[in-house]
Image: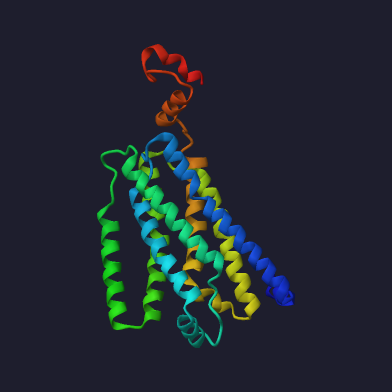
Amino acid sequence: MSLGYLDSLSPSAGETISTAIGWTYFVAWSVSFYPQIILNYRRKSVEGLSIDFLVYNVYGFACYAIFNTAFFFSKSIGDEYARRNNGHKNLVRFNDLFFSYHALALSLITFAQSFYYKRSPTQGSSFTVRTFFYLTLVGLLLVSTLSSVYNTVYFLSFIKLGCSMVKYVPQAWLNYRRKSTVGWSIHNIILDFAGGLLSFTQLVLDAARSGNIAEALGNPVKFGMGLASIGFDLIFLTQHYVLYTDRYDPLKFEAQLRFHGIPNYGSAENSDAGSI
């Protein structure tokens, strides 16, 4: 789609297309959180799931929710943004606001599962994620003390961007070490990939319609999240469908036996249960 074609769109048509894309990626990204929650529930375990990934998710979406709330509701912050960007309005929309709170709630649920369900003795938050948390928190306190509210809110957006850029690394590394993606929902990745493409498309469309392509960088979190999602999702899809194709999951097998009411699952007298 060329910029010339975008310029030819009527304001109402462009707004309709942008709104449709926005709600579609909102649905894709929002639904993407559920497969992992459901998988954890069925397996009664979070083995195969990186705890660092969960920590980055909760921390990042908490920052993103505050950032979106401030930009969506605060007139002073909106006016400051316009002053710094040649009168252009910020591109935070209602679906961005709703998504951030929905994502935070589901990230908290998934994080809570890591305490309730079975996990291996080696699963826990790493020194790296704890260092990231403390350093960015100190940075946030310094900015809030020495600078304006606008800069403080914008700093939250960069914390979220940092989380988005690195949160998938521990999971990709864990999959590599285990030579398996068992315990990590691929449906989450497929939906996340679709959401990333649509989010990036909406951002570019809105910026092109406004006549200011650089405006796409006015919402660095959304821009960065879209690119990070697409890149890492391609890695996970390759791991799942090309590199590590063994799908055997003993925990899922035990869950199937329990569902079918077979007692003493895993015992010798039920060794023929593998036909289920």
Image-based side of 138 in relation to 197, left or right: left
Q: How many marks?
A: 0
Q: Residue at x 68, y 66 (%)?
A: 17
Residue 86, x across and y down, in percent: 54, 87
Return the residue found at the far top. Answer: 269
Colour mapping = rainbow
Quarter of the image for residue 10 reads: bottom right
Residue at 46% x, 83% y: name it.
76
Relative image position of residue 30 (x, y in whole percent): 52, 54
Regarding residue 263, the answer to whether it shows in the image is yes
Residue 1 showing in the rendered view: no
Image quadrant assignment for residue 142: bottom left
Q: Which quadrant would the N terminus be assigned to in this image?
A: bottom right
Q: Is residue 74 above or below residue 225?
A: below
Foreground residue among 98 and 86 = 98
Residue 154 falls in image quadrant: bottom left
Task: Give x and y (percent) for residue 150.
Answer: 40, 80
